[in-house]
Amino acid sequence: MFRDLYSNLTAREQRAVRWSAAAMAAALWLSTAWTDPWFLLAIPLVAVGFFLYRARYRDEPDQHDLDLL
C-alpha cells in the first residue's frame, strides 16, 4: 500500500518525503535527548559502530554457513 503511494509520487515529491522523514527523525532524536542526554551520544555511537563493523566484515564469508551440497 505505501509502496504504491510512494511510487506514484513525482521525483520532487519523493525527495520531499525523504527530507521530511530525515527532519522528523532528527527532531525525534533531539527531543528524546532533551529528556535523557545519553541518547545524544548513544544513538550516533551505535550507528558508527554498526557501520564500522559492516565495513570490516563485509567481504568475509559466513563461518556458520552449512552449505553441504
Image: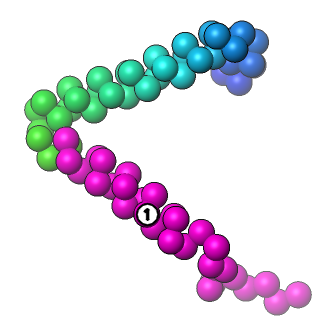
Residue 25 screen position, x and y as percent:
37, 28
Which residue is located at x 62 percent, y 85 percent? Answer: 63
Task: Quickly name the residue at label 1.
Answer: 52
Quarter of the view holding residue 16 = top right
Which residue is located at x 30 percent, y 47 percent? Answer: 44
Q: Say if 58 sits above or below 21 in the image.
A: below
Which residue is located at x 63 percent, y 84 percent? Answer: 64
Q: Say if 21 sits above or below 48 in the image.
A: above
Q: Is residue 2 left or right of residue 55?
A: right
Of residues 5 and 47, the one drawn nearer to the viewer in this rendering: 47
Residue 29 screen position, x and y as percent:
27, 32
Q: Is residue 35 left or right of residue 52?
A: left
Q: Secondary structure at mark 1?
A: helix
Look at the image and give the residue range highlighted in magenta.
Answer: 40-69
Residue at far right of view? 69
Crowding near the residue tagged with mark 1, few <14, some 14–19, many ≥20 C-alpha atoms within 10 Å: few
Residue at far bottom of view? 68
Q: Amino acid at mark 1?
A: Leu
Q: Is residue 17 left or right of residue 20?
A: right
Tell me, what colour scheme is on the image?
rainbow
Residue 11 screen position, x and y as percent:
69, 14
Residue 27 screen position, x and y as percent:
29, 23
User: Is residue 59 located in the magenta-colored stretch of the structure?
Assistant: yes
Which residue is located at x 20 percent, y 47 percent? Answer: 41
